[in-house]
Image (cartoon, rainbow, N blue to C red):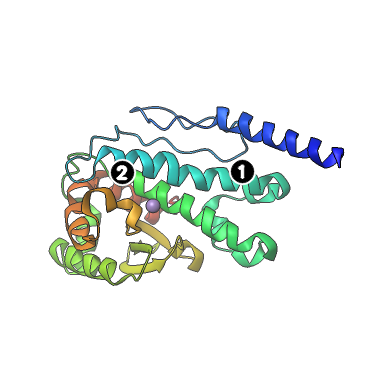
């Protein structure tokens, strides 16, 4: 049928045009968020050079993780928003807290892709070179609730190692500043249970496989070298102030 063929041709042309507009893989330091040419969602800038976390996390892992894996969530969300613009009208952390209100037909897709967008946005924020050590209020909360930094690392790494398959390990924070260690499968987030995330580590294999292969334990223990404790401190203060989002 000619009309079907024409539709196919037009659809293929649209895909080519979309590919030409796709964000560049390379992310330079300080680059602003990718303009939302394809919809309301945009890939947040990395905020540092992809090679700046070496030798702990290699540049290619960072480029693929940010530019392809995270960007795939953005592409999927923009495609969902074409027929469901309401998913862009509520901030991600609020939408994740009431997934039951999302139409059932798109609920799983929103859960996976908005969850992935929120988790990775947090993840890029709390990493950086020369991240220092916890100080001030967040250090006091770590001592009070998690038994100090060494015990936090031990317990967090053990929890991350116990995640079967793909998922995340988080430190959650309440409005009162109380901390806890929690894990989630897939791209789920404590935000889906009405809780806030102070920091978290991605234990999907794509986060470490190029350099560490199956050695998740090595990745988990090394990862602490690239935690940006100043950012974690800012997030702790934001949680107390009620302004922390993802
Ligand atoms: Mn990931």
Give the residue drawn at x 21%, y 53%: 212
In the rendered view of the protein, which quadrant contains the N terminus? top right
Query: Compared with residue 17, is residue 4 higher up or lower down, i.e. above or below?
Result: below
Whether residue 86 sits left or right of residue 193 in the image: it is right
Q: Residue furthest left?
A: 150
Rendered image: mark on residue 16: none
Q: Residue at x 28, y 45 (%)?
A: 127
Within 8 Å of ligand 1, the CB of disc 1?
no
Instruction: Count the labels in the image.
Output: 2
When asked about the image quadrant of residue 204, the answer is bottom left
Nearest the viewer among 137 and 220 is 220
Residue 38 image point, x, y percent: 61, 35
Single out the residue that lies furthest toward the front.
1
Say which residue label 2 marks: 61
- Front-most of residues 45 and 151: 45
Q: Position of residue 35 (x, y in %)?
A: 54, 29
Q: Find numbered disc 1 in the image and state the secondary structure of the residue it sits on.
A: helix
Return the residue at label 1.
78
Vertical placement of residue 88 versus 221, above or below: above
The answer to whether 198 appears left or right of 93 in the picture is left
Q: Residues within 10 Å of mark 1 (few under 14, many from 20)?
A: many
Mark 2 beta carbon near ligand 1 (under 8 Å): no
Specify whether 193 is left or right of 224: right
**Image x and y of residue 225, in percent:** 17, 48
Residue 199 seen anywhere in this rendered image of the structure: no
Q: Nearer the viewer, mark 1 or mark 2?
A: 2
Q: Report x, y in % for residue 79.
A: 64, 45
Q: Residue at x 21, y 56 (%)?
A: 219
**Mark 2 or mark 1, which is nearer the start of the sequence?**
2
**What residue is at 51 percent from the left and 48 percent from the top?**
73
Q: Secondary structure at mark 2?
A: helix
Q: Nearer the viewer, residue 65 or 125?
A: 65
């Amino acid at each position: 049928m000619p009309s079907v063929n024409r539709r196919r041709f037009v659809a293929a042309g649209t895909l080519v045009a979309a590919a030409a507009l796709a964000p560049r893989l390379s992310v330079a330091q300080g680059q602003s968020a990718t303009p939302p040419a394809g919809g309301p969602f945009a890939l947040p800038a990395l905020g540092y050079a992809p090679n700046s976390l070496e030798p702990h996390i290699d540049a290619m892992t960072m480029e693929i993780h940010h530019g392809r894996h995270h960007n795939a969530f953005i592409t999927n969300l923009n495609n969902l928003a074409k027929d469901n613009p309401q998913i862009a009208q509520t901030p991600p952390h609020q939408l994740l807290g009431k997934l039951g209100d999302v139409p059932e037909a798109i609920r799983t897709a929103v859960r996976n892709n908005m969850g992935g967008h929120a988790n990775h946005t947090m993840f890029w924020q709390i990493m950086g070179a020369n991240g220092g050590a916890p100080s001030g209020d967040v250090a006091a909360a770590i001592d009070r609730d998690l038994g100090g930094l060494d015990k936090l690392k031990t317990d967090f790494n053990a929890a991350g190692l116990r995640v079967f398959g793909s998922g995340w390990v988080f430190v959650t924070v309440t409005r009162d500043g109380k901390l806890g260690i929690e894990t989630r499968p897939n791209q789920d987030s404590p935000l889906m249970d009405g809780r806030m995330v102070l920091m978290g580590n991605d234990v999907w294999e794509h986060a470490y496989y190029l350099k560490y292969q199956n050695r998740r334990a090595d990745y988990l223990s090394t990862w602490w070298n690239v935690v940006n404790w100043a950012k974690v401190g800012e997030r702790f203060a934001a949680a107390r102030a009620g302004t922390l989002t993802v």
